[in-house]
Amino acid sequence: MHRKSVSYAKWGYIFIAPFFIVFAIFTLVPLVSTFYNSLFENYTVMGYQQIGPNFVGLDNFSTIFDEENDLGKYFVNTFILWIAGFIPQIFFSLLFASWFTDLRLKLKTGAYKVIFYLPNVIMAAAMGMLFFTMFSQNGPVNSIYMKITGSDAPYMFFTHANSQRAIIALINFLMWFGNTTIMLMAAINGIDPSLYESAQIDGANPTQTFFKITLPLIRPILLYVLITSLIGGLQMYDVPQIITQDGLSCDRTSMTVVMYLQRYLSVSKNYGMAGALSVILFIVAAVLSMIIFTTVQEREPKKKKPAAKGGK
Amino acid sequence: MAAPVDAVGQQSNARSLLIRRIICYVILTLFAVIALIPFAILLVNMTRKTTDIQKGFSLIPGDYLIKNFKTVMSKHDWKMLNSLKNSLVISFSSSLLSVYFSALTAYAIHVYDFKLRKPLFTFILMIMMVPAQVSALGFVNLMNSWHLTDTFIPLILPSIAAPATFFFMKQYMDSSLPLEIVEAARIDGSGEFRTFNFLITPILKPALAVQMIFTFVTSWNNYFIPALILSDKNKRTLPIVIGIIRSADYASFDMGAVYMSIGISIIPVAVVYLILSKFIIRGIALGAVKG
């Protein structure tokens, strides 16, 4: 328990004031106003004729779920782009994290960690632009492709739905596998080393140790990684936006939910629909957050006296 | 060094360990190469002439670096240098504000006993994952009505409330800020605000620095919200310029200049990262929710 310091309580309020005032002004008020907007018909026709705002209740929500609005398709796109990057990401991150922390292997890991994490600090928009340029008709990838196959026509990566999606997933994978590797390393380092020692004495091989000790014990972190990645994936915007240029290419097969939101916000200026879509996004993110929140809370008591802190 | 087993087992163990180690290094190196190739291509093509770039790929640098740079600078609708400056101003100010005020908030929750302490802590944890995009509509409308679009305020001021930074600082304080220090400062007659500014922040320095780098990078790379707030040519940040280069008539572009503009957006952050990498890598592990 903390020592009583009742007379200092007012300082607590003073110190947190800027944070909560700013939060209220720049997040809470806009959030409420976004929700409020979702109940109104409010858009511009042909860029000049303003319709509304007229109160329409929940009409925007029924409109957005209409077949022709393709919201389902954009959710599916977002999910495909996310999962195609996430599966290799979690696979290799687990593999590398277990190698990096293997007491018998004793690998030199410093440089690898630095290189693997590098793409994560790079601007996603620039990363998208770089890959778009690399895979374009006369980019380096096609010049290598044509040399190897002897074909005289370049492969048009950005006119096929699958290759376009694969490139976006590849960028997501490259940007995030280093981060996940380091997170999982911290988790594995937190496991009591005596467990590994006794497994070794009992003659367990690395594969057995991994599946019987490591994997079960880092399950909470794996869940955390999964959900944060899912919430991140839900917000996917920069890379596909740059690669596909507004998402229209390949019959919108790489248009994500947030790209769709951006179209309502700045292209069609349909604020009612943008509001409804925001509410839907909020609900999905909130449900996912609740899962993390409850798992973090569950571990809270255990964390009080942690034997292992992440990097010291 | 070797595991305590019989002599035969020991020998085969050592050999299989060596083989395993080699396999690990080969695969790890392969992935390091994959992660670095895009940047190698970028660096090389930044120095090459567009016609050479289009002729085919080569790892040999050209001598067009300065020329490409000049081409980028001469593109008046890109305003690369100006955008670089804008990105710097916004990222630096927001990382400073974010780190200071979020640490102050974490400190208050850590040190003081007040009624709303627990509920507010829970509240911040709950809002941590809410994506910025869901309030974007209201945010842009509000900034519009306050005539703050095309200013940097909407991109800087909100970073005062950074739940992720708060959470990280709170974790750090839990592990390395004993309350006795605060008590001792009080006995010495230090005011609460003074204690935080001059006694506590030096203790928090490693965590503050790591968070400052992270917030800087996040702000530097931010595309969605700035693109909604800034439309004036002179106010653009780098990601917006990248978007504009992409959406303009791409085929007619000078490829050397395109690579150069990507390089200008990427290299400053990459260099800072490489210099501070040890520090940053340790910071990511620190920020991971501990098991």
Image (cartoon, rainbow, N blue to C red):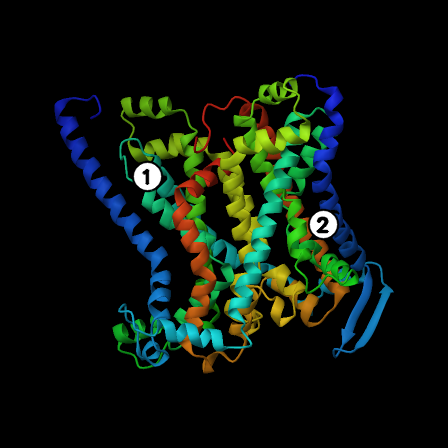
> Is A191 in front, or is B47?
B47
What residue is at 43 percent from the left and 65 percent from the top? B263
Q: Can residue A237 be seen in this view?
A: no
Residue, disc 2: A27
Q: Mark 1 lies on which chain?
A: A
> Is B61 in front, or is A158?
B61
| Residue A92 horizontal side relative to residue B144, left or right | left
Distance from Cα at disc 1 to Cα at disc 2 = 42 Å
Q: Which of marks 1 and 2 is in front?
A: 2
Numbered label attached to residue A239 = none
Around disc 1, counting alpha carbons within 10 Å, would you say few (fewer than 14), some (14 to 19), or many (20 or more)?
A: many
- Residue A152, image quadrant: bottom left
What residue is at 57 percent from the left and 54 percent from the top? B91
Q: Provide the secondary structure element on which disc 1 rests.
A: helix
| Residue at the limit of the structure toward the front, as seen here | B189
What residue is at 71 percent from the left and 72 percent from the top? A268
Q: Where is residue B49 in the image (x, y as percent from the top left)?
A: 34, 77
Q: Mark 2 lies on which chain?
A: A
- Please, is residue A96 above or below residue B66 in the view? above
Q: Where is residue B218 in the image (x, y as percent from the top left)?
A: 55, 52
Residue, disc 1: A99
| Residue B34 horizontal side relative to residue B112, left or right | left
